[in-house]
Amino acid sequence: MTKHRTTRRGFLKTTIATGGALAAAGTARAAGDPAITEVQPWAQYLGDGVDARPYGTPSEYEAHVVRRNVPWLTADPVSSVNFTPLHELDGIITPNGLCFERHHAGIAELDPAAYRLMINGLVDRELVFTLDDLMRFPRENHVYFLECAANTGMEWRGAQLNGCQFTHGMIHNVMYTGIKLGHILAEAGVKTEGKWLLAEGADASAMTRSIPMEKALDDCLVAFKMNGEALRPEQGYPVRLVVPGWEGNMWVKWLRRLEIGDQPWHHREETSKYTDLLADGKARRFTWEMDAKSVITNPSPQAPIGHGPGPTVLTGVAWSGRGTIPRVDVSLDGGANWQAARMDGPSLPKSMHRFYYEFDWDGSPLLLQSRAHDSTGYVQPTKDALRAVRGENSIYHNNGIQTWAINEEGVAENVEVS
């Protein structure tokens, strides 16, 4: 892994042709390949029945596609991070078993029959709901990304982690099923002076975050399903809070209590943590929204180019906490020149967007970058532009442009350009 800063000189001396569909001649195998002309082992015996395998088990040939952690990043497994393997995925939906997850006191195992959600504070009626009670409210389905504010945080001072799973994998994108938080608040009756909400989790860390009432009443959900099935235990089963477009630490898991107040609480996770430390020692607070961001997932350090010169497919994901991503630009030469990527699949607000760029690779080294534009007109900045404003002290809200260097063998490495 390269930690020094790399210049653009010597890269891409030859212009690389760009375009849409590629001719099949450069990608097809020659006739007579034994893999197609001979009967393969799996066609000569009966396979296992469906009931013989645990639920959700992928092919044995995909066993390497798993969440992974970085052992030195957290002090103890009970306060750990597991990263989504972005380089192994396509489309925009993250499979439940591969979703990024972060916990602060291990995974709480709640009995749904004993689950309760309490509302107290500046309300007309303090209430307690069971899971069955919540199921009686009108339900909604929305696809949203959840991104940790610390995603890409280790890259503030330079290239550190060699793989987009580790640089950008503190994110997932799923369909949540739940009920509007506003419905629950309406049942309790928020008093006029109630301007803030404190969400509290039921795990041993008692995670709490302050949320302004405007956001709580706008698009927040109390969710109990993801991608159609019950929340996984590590995702807050049986109920979690969904705060679309805002940093993942606010999406309190194992949600047990909602307190209404007239000011923010300034608890640990919004003071000593999850604030952006600037160069002068001051910290930005309440930086909830996740700015537009993108990353090329293939090619990347964990997904090198596995073929010689010829037709090549580049792909990645982009997202914004403020809306949709109508456009992503791609550079093959470290930002000297940009081309529009092809956006594909659904375009949903506060959700991942998939982009592709097909080109003929001539075998020359590449410096791959992507640059997202969101529906508000915001354009993803360079890392140097962020550092010029915020310095290098922060570990949160790094949405700078990522660079992968590809050598003549197709091997990719995490670098920075200047």
Image (cartoon, rainbow, N blue to C red):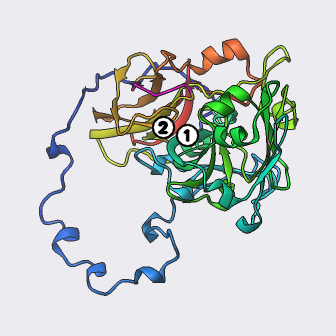
Please tell me which residue lies in front, 232 or 86: 232
Residue 286 location, x and y as percent? 75, 24
Q: Is residue 268 left or right of residue 342?
A: right
Residue that label 1 marks: 145
Q: Could you tell me which residue is drawn at 14 percent across and 57 percent down?
A: 30
- Report if residue 151 lies within the magenta region: no
The amino acid beneath tag 2 is: Met
- Of the numbered discs 2 and 1, the one sitting upstream in the chain is 1
Please tell me which residue lies in front, 410 or 92: 92
Residue 21 location, x and y as percent? 20, 36
| Quarter location, residue 327 | top left
Does residue 264 appear in the picture of this structure?
yes
Q: Could you tell me which residue is drawn at 48 percent across and 15 percent down?
A: 377
The amino acid beneath tag 1 is: Phe
Mark sitting on residue 296: none
Q: How many marks?
A: 2
Mark 2 neighbour density, 10 Å: few (under 14) some (14–19) many (20 or more): many
Please tell me which residue lies in front, 88 or 90: 90
The magenta region covers: 322-331
Q: Is residue 77 above or below residue 182?
A: below
Asked if the residues shown at circle 2 and circle 1 are in contact, with their CB atoms under 8 angstroms apart, the answer is yes
Residue that label 2 marks: 352
- Report if residue 326 lies within the magenta region: yes
Q: Is residue 221 left or right of residue 33?
A: right
Q: CA distance from mark 2 to mark 1?
A: 6 Å
Give the quadrant of the N terminus: top right
Does residue 82 appear in the picture of this structure?
no
Residue 240 location, x and y as percent? 68, 50
Q: Could you tell me which residue is drawn at 26 percent across and 80 percent down?
A: 43
- Pick out the residue farthest to the left: 31
Give the quadrant of the C terminus: top right
